[in-house]
Image (tube, helix red, strand yellow):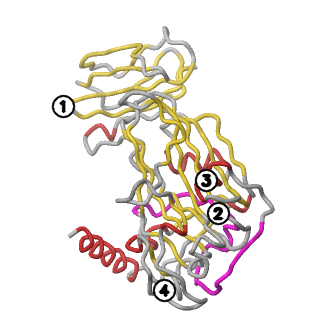
């Protein structure tokens, strides 16, 4: 039954793709590392220690994500080559740019050989919900000629470090793994449908191929193959600090590009479908007092960046909230009514 359900899911995904043949991925690689993070987390999440290592042409934002099955039309990409070469049609079997960049030790350990042309985005953040989730697609020009792992085994990973709600500590926990496996990482050798000569569709043997799209003759992406939309997630402790590393690299050689597409604004930010969605905090940044629209009857808690409640208001009806006793810095305003909770960020000057 599991196999049948996967087959049905893949058929539905392919039918969605067929309605988007005229759609096109559009790429913008003139984007700062901070803006990359804001694209996937949103402006309400506090981020810090943002670092990008890689070629300038190897990271950026995209639109048209729905054409490859992502729920969000926009997001970010990392590639081992050039973002300019990502849009389709698929007109070559070996599109490649050698960026002359070094590899990444985490991906070297994952793919089992030396890595090259790594693009690595790292940051710290404080989640406001109990789940960190990223939706993504991995694609590569290495398909379908180089999938045995003998010559090339490009891969990608999203690693998280921070407190485990069940106790202990995550240390570079890889949340991007092949579903229904023993945590196999996302690499060419772990998701494919066998070898095929340039320009030919694959016919097996299948290695987790229910998650693979053969893009031979494709019109949307240049990559010869890519995965179905996948999701990596992990339970976290709200308001604690976590470190995230998003990385992709060529493995075994620097030839032929691979890319990682990450969907924007998933449920790392908590936005409930209720009457709290119209609440606005102003001015922000604020000094002495801030005001909250549509706040009547709500309970309010103000937390610092460590998650500690520093002020509490039960069923308030005034729009103004005094903050003269708060030190300058970032705070979370947590508003609750009828079981719904909305969290907003405020900056105290």
Local secondary structure at mark 3: strand
Residues at marks 3 and 4, CA–CA distance in whole angstroms: 27 Å
Residues at marks 1 and 3, CA–CA distance in whole angstroms: 41 Å
Percent position of residue 50, x then y: 64, 40
Quarter of image, res 5: bottom left
Q: Magenta residues, as a range? A: 71-98
Residue carrying label 2: 79
Residue carrying label 3: 247
Mark 3 or mark 4, which is nearer to you?
Answer: 4
Residue 187 vs 242, above or below: the answer is below
Task: Looking at this view, name the residue that lies furthest to the right.
Answer: 100
Does the CB distance between marks 1 and 3 fall below 8 Å? no
Residue drawn at x 40%, y 78% as measured from the top left: 17
Does the CB distance between marks 4 and 1 fall below 8 Å? no
Mark 4 or mark 1, which is nearer to you?
Answer: 4
Residue 92 vs 55, above or below: the answer is below
Quadrant where the N terminus is found in the figure: bottom left
Quarter of image, res 199: bottom right
Q: Which residue is at the front of the view, 55 or 189?
A: 189
């Amino acid at each position: 039954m599991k196999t049948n359900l996967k087959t049905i899911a893949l058929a539905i995904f392919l039918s969605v793709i067929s309605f988007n043949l005229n759609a096109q991925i559009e790429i913008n690689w003139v984007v700062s590392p901070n803006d990359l993070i804001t694209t996937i987390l949103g402006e309400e999440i506090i981020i810090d220690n943002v670092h990008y290592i890689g070629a300038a042409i190897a990271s950026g934002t995209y639109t048209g994500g729905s054409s490859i099955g992502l729920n969000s039309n926009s997001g970010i990409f990392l590639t081992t080559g050039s973002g300019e070469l990502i849009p389709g049609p698929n007109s070559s079997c070996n599109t490649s740019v050698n960026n002359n960049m070094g590899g990444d030790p985490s991906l070297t350990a994952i793919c089992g050989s030396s890595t090259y042309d790594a693009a690595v985005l790292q940051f710290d953040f404080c989640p406001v919900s109990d789940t960190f989730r990223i939706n993504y697609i991995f694609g590569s020009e290495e398909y379908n000629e180089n999938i045995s792992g003998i010559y090339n085994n490009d891969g990608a990973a999203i690693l998280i470090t921070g407190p485990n709600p069940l106790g202990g500590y995550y240390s570079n926990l890889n949340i991007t793994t092949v579903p229904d496996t023993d945590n196999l990482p996302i690499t060419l050798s772990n998701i494919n449908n066998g070898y095929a000569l340039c320009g030919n569709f694959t016919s097996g043997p299948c290695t987790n191929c229910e998650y693979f799209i053969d893009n031979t003759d494709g019109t949307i992406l240049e990559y010869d193959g890519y995965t179905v939309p996948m999701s990596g997630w992990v339970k976290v402790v709200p308001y604690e600090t976590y470190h995230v590393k998003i990385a992709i690299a060529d493995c075994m050689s620097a030839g032929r590009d691979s890319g990682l597409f990450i969907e924007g604004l998933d449920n790392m930010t908590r936005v409930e479908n209720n009457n709290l969605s119209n609440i606005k905090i102003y001015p922000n940044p604020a000094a002495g007092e801030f005001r909250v629209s549509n706040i009547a009857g709500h309970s309010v808690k103000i937390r610092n960046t460590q998650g500690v409640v520093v002020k509490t208001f039960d069923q308030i009806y005034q729009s103004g909230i005094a903050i003269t006793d708060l030190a300058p810095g970032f705070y979370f305003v947590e508003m609750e009514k009828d079981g719904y909770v909305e969290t907003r960020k405020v900056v105290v000057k």
